[in-house]
Amino acid sequence: MNRNQVEGGVKDAAGKVQRKFGEMVGDDRHEAEGTEKQVEGKTQKTAGDVTNAVDRATDKVRDAFRK
């Protein structure tokens, strides 16, 4: 796991809490900000997933040439 995956997961969770809080109290601003934070977190986590996939592929190619 890399930093983007962890930070993205935390943002996603925090956004979900904020969105649910906004829903509970009827505050559209908190609900919208929470949704925005969730999207940001999911995007960051996806970027981390892509980075991991590229790193693994690079390692496989490197290993194949070493043999």
Image (spheres, grey):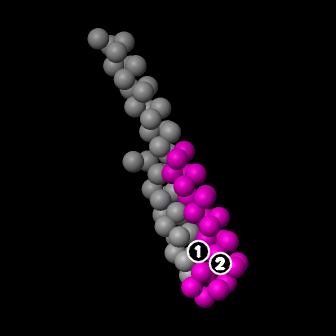
Cβ atoms at labels 1 and 2 below 8 Å apart: yes
Q: Residue at x 69, y 79 (%)?
A: 28
Q: What's the mark number on residue 30?
A: 2
Q: What's the mark number on residue 42?
A: none
Most foreground residue, 11 or 34: 34
The amino acid at mark 1 is Arg
- Say if 14 sits above or below 58 in the image: below
> Badge 2: few (under 14), some or many (20 or more) residues near its Cα, within 10 Å?
some
Does the segment drawn in magenta span residue 35?
yes
The total number of labels drawn is 2
Residue 24: give x, y in percent of width and height. 57, 85
Q: Which residues are magenta?
A: 22-47
Most foreground residue, 43 or 31: 31
Q: Residue at x 51, y 57 (%)?
A: 8
Q: Is 3 on the left or on the right of 43, as rendered?
A: left
According to the picture, the residue beneath numbered tag 1 turns out to be: 19
Cα distance between the residues tagged 1 and 2: 6 Å
Image quarter (top left, top right, bottom left or bottom right) of the C terminus: top left
Most foreground residue, 62 or 18: 18
